Image (cartoon, rainbow, N blue to C red):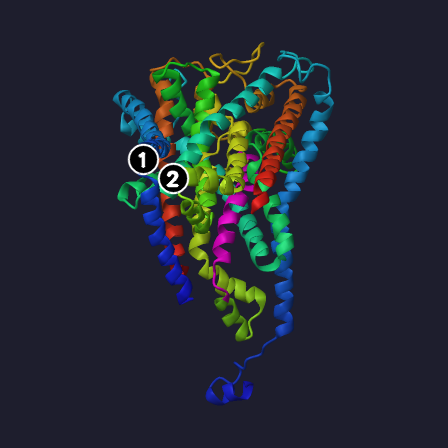
Amino acid sequence: MQNTNFSDEFNRESMRSLEKNASDDIQEKIIEALLFGCALISVFTTFGIVFIIFRVTFEFFQEVSLAQFFLDTKWTPLFAQKHFGIWPLINGTFLTTAIAMLVAIPLGLCSAIYLAEYASPKAAAILRPAVELLAGVPTVVYGYFALLFVTPVLRQFLPIEIFNALSAGLMMGIMISPTVGSISLDAIQSVPRSLREGAYAIGVTKLETIIKVVLPAALSGIAASIILGISRAVGETMTVLIAAGQEPRISLNPFQSVETMTAYMAQISGGDSPRGSANYNTLYAVGAVLFLLTLFLNVVSHWISNRYKEKYD
Amino acid sequence: MASSISRNNPQRPSEEFSPNIEQRETTGKIFEIIFLIGLSIGLVVLAVLVFDVLKDGLGRLFTPGFLTGTPSRFADQGGIRPAIFGSILLGGLVMLIAVPIGVGAALYLEEYAPKAWWTDVIEINVSNLAGVPSIVYGLLGLGVFNYLLNFGPALLSGALTLSLLSLPVIIVTGREAIRAVPDSIRQASYGLGTTKWQTVWNHVLPYAVPGIMTGVIISVSRAIGDAASLIVVGAVSFLTFNPGLFQRFMALPIQIYTYITRPEPGFSNAAAASIIVLLLLIMVLNGGAIYFRQRFSTFK
């Protein structure tokens, strides 16, 4: 053990001096600069997003006050009687996201637990990519399926509207379950074996070990996966645009049509509001809220998973 | 064991430990089945989805002119050729633009970047960008490519937007692949007196190609399937010619979305048929990438 540590240290030292000798050349410097440029593009992308969104959002708030945006409860920028209250859109996003997570959390956790604790390595090698196929299906396809298959089936025994939050949320949940599943799986797999063996040694069954030892130990990774899943659901567009409808309202009834922030953005982009008008600028104001919300969720998720990584390193 | 516990707690003799192993193991078995069902639900839905799409779309797919014609306002006529061309062009451009930049960035971060605060900033930035919703990338593309660079709602704007969207995934998976290359390979190369770039280009990169390909498949498939950002950038739903670089453009997901939103009954079949084409396109892409991965991983 000590031996490998020593040789690792030695490798790193010798590598550094080798690199120094090898990169003492103008051509090498140019290549390094080019590669650095590639890496910088990601930083420019972020600056671009922030600059573009917030410049127009600032313009928007010259015309529409923050109070109108955050205190009004109606969203009708395209009507003669204009209201710019964001809450109906947030309501729609919240409702579809909540339904999606009610599906994605149990499905994701079940598949993570099964793959980590029960499946043979051979079965896991087939099942894991199969489950992850779900995340690779284009979201417009889920929208098609939600509107033209799930809704008609549900309508046979539930009083739901043609466009409704329920079908969209259900399909979004299926789509997001691999996100929750694969990060949870990593977290469960990095729980040290010794913890499980300790539990078995005092006569605990497999299920009890999983519920009382493995899952609590993997809790921060699981939490991070759930928050990332929420972020995905909040930002998902096509499924909700197609299946949940375009009726901004404040209601927690999943049988009704709602409009999410993303669906509104797609709607206004496809419409013909003149550029620069207040109702066109809502695109950016809503985009700013969406961006900040998903950024917040991603940062929290990242922060939680970093904390848990340190624990077992 | 049980008797010693009760002797230590004479006040509560009824709390004797009873292992009841059989019942606990049965509960365990039941939950194993529940977990398996939870895993299977997604797969069952996927199977039903594919079956439903095939059932609705296969008939329409084989009507004459569907693959070779241009869109029509009649549900049972016309085709999706401009959308297929648009998607293939978009996918090709994303590969040309995003893959070199993404791999370059990954190489910089893994092989060149010094340990400094700004390297951390780039890293955190990349992982945050991976979580930005596609429709927000649409806003970026609209602002930068349509208006600032004045390309307008052209295919190039769409391709550049999708490239930015794909970059984070390519960078993240590329870095993992590069990190997995053993140091001994680099040392052997330096031992022959090569420059740093020669080592990276001739040894590190070929070794990392299989892993990099995985990221490329994931991100380019996602780009081809993405509709939200293209709606914002200004993809159109009706085109009578194959789109060029600086022309207005269609793409399969946009075509599918348009078909779904048309109320006349036959359009849903056209949507399903287009979905089959889109899924086939993604499968071909995956197949090609897997083939390349196999070819390049021979010396592993």
The residue depicted at 58 percent of the width and 66 percent of the height is: A206
Indicate the quadrant containing the N terminus of chain A: top left, top right, bottom left or bottom right: bottom left
The residue depicted at 39 percent of the width and 19 percent of the height is: B145
Query: Hey, which quadrant is residue A8 in on the image?
Result: bottom left
Residue placed farthest to the front in the image?
A: B192
Magenta region, main secondary structure: helix
Q: Is the residue marked by circle 2 packed among few (<14), some (14-19), or many (20+) residues within 10 Å?
A: many
In the rendered structure, does residue A66 fall within the stretch colored magenta? no
Indicate the quadrant containing the C terminus of chain A: top left, top right, bottom left or bottom right: bottom left
Look at label 1 and name its amino acid: Asp
Q: How far across and how far down the image is residue B88, in percent?
A: 57, 22
Q: Which residue is mark 1?
A: A25
The boundaries of the magenta stretch are A165-193
In the rendered structure, does residue A167 fall within the stretch colored magenta? yes
Q: Nearer the viewer, residue A235 or A129?
A: A129
Q: Which mark is residue B195?
A: 2
Query: Hey, which quadrant is residue B257 in on the image?
Result: top right
Q: Nearer the viewer, residue B294 or B93?
A: B294
Q: How far across and how far down the image is residue B134, in percent?
A: 45, 30
Asked if disc 1 and disc 2 are in contact, CB closer than 8 Å, the reply is yes
> Mark 1 and mark 2, same subunit?
no
The local secondary structure at tag 2 comes to loop
Q: Nearer the viewer, residue A295 or B157?
A: B157
Asked whether residue B275 is in view, the answer is yes
Q: CA distance from mark 1 to mark 2?
A: 9 Å
When the figure is inspected, residue B32 is found, relative to residue B212, above or below; the finding is below
Look at label 2 and name its amino acid: Thr
The local secondary structure at tag 1 comes to loop
Q: Is the residue marked by circle 1 packed among few (<14), some (14-19), or many (20+) residues within 10 Å?
A: few
